[in-house]
Image (cartoon, grey):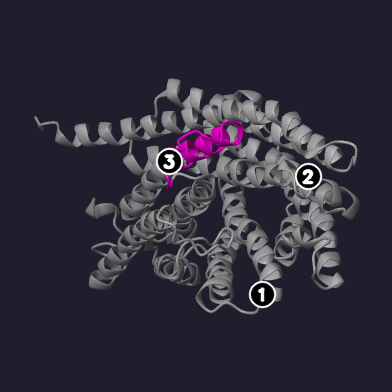
Amino acid sequence: MSDHTLPHHDDKSGHLHVDIKAIDASVRLPVIILFGNAIHWLVIASLLSLIVSVKLIAPGFLGGVSFLTYGRLAPMARDLMLYGWASQAALGTGIWLMARLCGRPLGGEHSGGFGGELLRTLVISATVLWNLAVLLGTLAILAGYSSGVEWLEYPSWASAMLLLSFLLIGIWAVLLFDRRGTGRAVVAQWYLVAAFCWFPWVYGTANLLLVWKPIQASAQGPIQSWYCGSLLALWLLPVALASAYALLPRLLGSHLNRRNLATLSFWMLLLLGGWNGMDRLIGGPVPAWMTSAGVVAGVLFLIPVFMISMNLLGMDRKEAIVAGSISARFLLMGLYALICVGSIGALASLPSVSGAVRFTAFTEAKTQLWILGAISLPLFAVLYESFPQLLGRDCWSPVLTGRHYILTLVGIAMLISLLLLGGLFTGIALADPTVSFLNITSYSYPFHLMECVAQLLLLIAALILGANITRALAGDYLLNKQPRK
């Protein structure tokens, strides 16, 4: 391994010779830890989501256990999906892609000496701290110590741990970009740097104003809505898009279509992303300009979405190549999910539509499509692409991989369709004064019943992914344990 420790410069040309093996070796342990723990949290979050769905049709389910109430299980499932799975997988994706795109290893014997080893230890320690914060924060919610703020239910000490662990990784990522040896930054690096800079500001500001030192109640609604939109559009989505821009051209053997649109779509995404959640305030006791800005941002958000789609979906590709690459299929499905997110978000931002569906499952459908579709699908692609290169061998089971892909897509499609249809039917019924609320609940019962089936499919898909990655890591362990001849 010593021959592949550090990328080196050619004395004559001055160009950097990137040693991919050295880079993968340097980030192997933190990336595997992050993805491995993220998948474990994904399984737990999927299980809790299934229990929450069952409670909607059978409120007495697990009623004998006092602390397993809907009010505790629902935020636990959502926070585990956001911080246990999506954010942690985004950190693993960011580390692997940033090191590769910048052409420098994370740390090692010949990359900064003691300083390089110290940096590597700090990043690994940050991954442990992140998982400890998620675990303790989840247990705190289960014990009834939630902050009560949507998507920020972890107590102040747990959120402070999350922020500290992110800074230990994020500062390294930004410094690595500044000292990159690959010349001009590519589109994927733009999105990674933006994501790593936006998250600490968004998460820290929201916690400061809503959890650590709460401000007056009248301002808490707009801040919470801003945070929900920014967490998705300015942290998780840029990492997902960086994955697509970095991997799709190479996987498809093609070039970006209309590359000049990449710059404009990038800046428009950053401009509109923070306002993307303000449409939640339509009809609320807030200044009219806030809701108007949310409506405009929700509709205009379609512009960067379509420009990104033209960039990536407009590339030349052969169906045989797509069919043979699980990562390419996940990335393409993630882009289609992003188009659906933009379209549904623009529709839901219209005041007339929002007034009919804001208190129904329609809003939840948009959130689930964000997390499970536009964000999680590209993260799955990076997982499947990175592990064979990190482990140095083909580590995936084709059977398990195919079943995970099919069950994930079917589960997401079924869940989103049921939530959308259930929300529309409920909204129409709520607008009819002749329909009693009891009848409305009976109308939604079939949709909730089928939602349980969709959540079950997603749980099975998560279990299959967990089995697949366990098989991959166990195989690596067994290979290392084989006696040398």
Residue drawn at (87%, 53%) of the image:
350
Give the magenta range: 42-67
- First reached walking from the N terminus: tag 2 or tag 3: 3
Report the disc number at residue 79. Answer: none
Amino acid type, label 2: Ile
Q: Nearer the viewer, mark 2 or mark 3?
A: 3
Residue 401: image x %, image y %?
46, 27
Q: Alpha carbon of mark 2 to alpha carbon of mark 3: how far?
A: 28 Å
Percent coordinates x, y for residue 153 in the rendering:
51, 60
Question: Who is closer to the viewer here, 32 or 81?
Answer: 81
Residue 275 location, quadrant: bottom right
Instruction: Give amino acid for label 1.
Output: Ala
Q: Secondary structure at mark 1?
A: helix
In the picture of the structure, the residue carrying the numbered disc 1 is 217
Disc 2: which residue: 344
Pointer 3 residue: 44
Instruction: Count neighbours of disc 2 (C-alpha within 10 A) and say few if under 14, some if 14 to 19, many if 20 or more.
Output: many
Question: Element under label 2?
Answer: helix
